Image: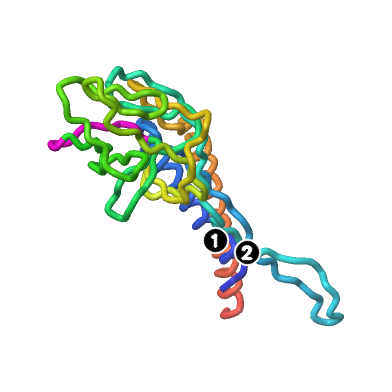
Amino acid sequence: MDRGLYIAASGMLAELARQDQLANDLANTSTPGYKADRSAQSSFADALIVNERTGAAIGSLPYGTAISAVQTDLSQGAFKETGEPLDLALDGDGFFAVKAPAGVRYTRDGQFSPDAKGTLVNASGYPVLDDKGSPVVVTGTSSPTIGPDGTVTVSGKAVAKLAVVALEGAHKEGDTLFSGKPGAAPKETSVRQGYLEASAVNVAQAMVDMITSMRAYESTQRVIHAIDETLGRGINGTTQ
């Protein structure tokens, strides 16, 4: 394959992956606790170009680009007051813990509610865990009160304390769940009852990035078209 075609095609594939990431961010602008992703691009190893006659090095030529990593921006989003007693937000670093089918996972989405048995669950139906690793149960005649330290009180009685953990090596799984190595709760972090953390997506910036990526894709597409025409003229010229 012509090296120019390979380089241009790799650039198109990288921009397609970037557009998928940006589209997912834009689709989650209303998802509580959502964290935006950033696609990092890097070039493949360069090829050394040498003079065939003298063997002297002329320079290098890259083999194209690729998405080297997708990094999640864990910056805290704005708070939105809902007034719902089981809507919770974390003011500071840290994550809530939930029991997902694949094991314990962590989230900043505090949109919780009780199921039919009174177990506190997130929007996906996964049980919310306390600091002992057990599901939080909030049965009672009055609405639960959650203190800044995560203590859950029902009818004047403390029934549990929410697990709030620091997370080392946080890795996104889905839109709002993370895996990683949990640690002690950050000292300055507090739980805010009646609030949700809004999506941290900057819509205006994401739209600008999407337009930039689409223009880069179209430019690379024109490069491939130009190379294809040049190769075609070369082939036709040699066969005539």
Residue placed at 32% from the left, 53% from the top?
103
| Residue 132 falls within the magenta-colored stretch | no
Q: Residue furthest front?
A: 157
Task: Residue 111: give x, y in percent of width and height.
Answer: 30, 31
Residues rendered magenta in the picture: 109-117
- Is residue 221 in view from this perspective? no
Residue placed at 35% from the left, 35% from the top?
162
Q: Nearer the viewer, mark 1 or mark 2?
A: 2
Where does label 2 land, which residue? Answer: 44
Q: What is the quadrant of residue 154 in the picture?
A: top left
Question: What's the coloring here?
Answer: rainbow
Helix, strand or loop: magenta stretch: loop
Q: What is the quadrant of residue 148 in the picture?
A: top left
Foreground residue, 101 or 229?
101
Quadrant assignment for the N terminus: bottom right
- Is residue 202 in view from this perspective? yes
| Residue 115 falls within the magenta-colored stretch | yes
Using residue 172 as the reference point, say whether residue 99 is left or right of it.
left
Q: Is residue 81 above or below residue 233?
A: above
Q: How crowded is the residue under tag 1: few (<14 C-alpha within 10 Å), some, or many (20+)?
A: many
Residue placed at 47% from the left, 51% from the top?
181
Q: How crowded is the residue under tag 2: few (<14 C-alpha within 10 Å), some, or many (20+)?
A: some
Amino acid at pointer 2: Phe
Amino acid at pointer 1: Ser
Residue placed at 74% from the left, 71% from the top?
48
Q: Residue furthest left?
A: 116
Q: What is the quadrant of residue 97 in the picture?
A: top left
Where does label 1 land, which residue? Answer: 10
